[in-house]
Image: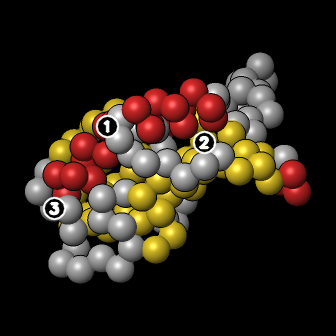
Amino acid sequence: MNARDQRPEVAVAHVVLETDRMEASCRFARTVGMRPVFEGPEVSVYEMRGGTHLLLMLADKVSGGDAPFGLMVDDIRASHSRFAELGLDPSPIEARPTINHELFNLREPSGHLITVFSSHVVGPV
């Protein structure tokens, strides 16, 4: 590691989300701001800031529920407004003083509830 590089030494490489609605889930990923890397009928890959990849995996049946990850945005109010304008129906913004964040939720097409947090970056990433 370069002595001037202040980024953490590790990052999350991949997070996985099962979907039974691949095309709709792909459209959702692009709409919220992920960069398409590969879009296929059984697996699709999207890049997020920091190089983390979301792997959408086709499944016959998806139970939905809480997603196994959350997203983070720099301007939570601007993102909330943009997502509302795009018809994604975000929940109201909530303050969580115990963790010093604000957040809202989005429902992904296959039923997963994804929490979107205000930024908590403390240095270069």
Q: Position of residue 52 (x, y in %)?
A: 48, 44
Q: Which residue is mark 1?
A: 30
Report crowding for label 2: few under 14, some 14 to 19, many 20 or more residues within 10 A (C-alpha): some
Above or below, 27 against 23 in this view is above
Which residue is pictured at 11% across the width and 57% down the height? 41
69 or 75: nearer the viewer? 75
Identify the residue at the far top of this view. 4
Q: Please give left or right for residue 81 compared with residue 43 in the image.
A: right
- Residue closest to the far right: 98
- In the drawing, what numbered circle is on residue 74? none
How many C-alpha atoms fall within 10 Å of the one at disc 3: few (<14), some, or many (≥20)?
few
Q: Is residue 36 left or right of residue 39?
A: right
User: Is residue 91 something one can see in this rendering?
Assistant: yes
Q: Amino acid at mark 3?
A: Glu
Q: Which of the image's four quarters has the C terminus? A: top right
The local secondary structure at tag 2 comes to strand
Residue 12 percent location from the top left of the image: 56, 51
| Helix, strand or loop status at disc 1 | helix
Residue 72 numbered mark, or none: 2
> Can you see residue 47?
no
Point out which mark residue 42 bears.
3
Q: Quadrant of residue 98?
A: bottom right
| Cα distance between the residues tagged 3 and 1 | 17 Å
Three-letter amino acid code at the position of disc 2: Met
The residue drawn where x is 22% and y is 73% is 59
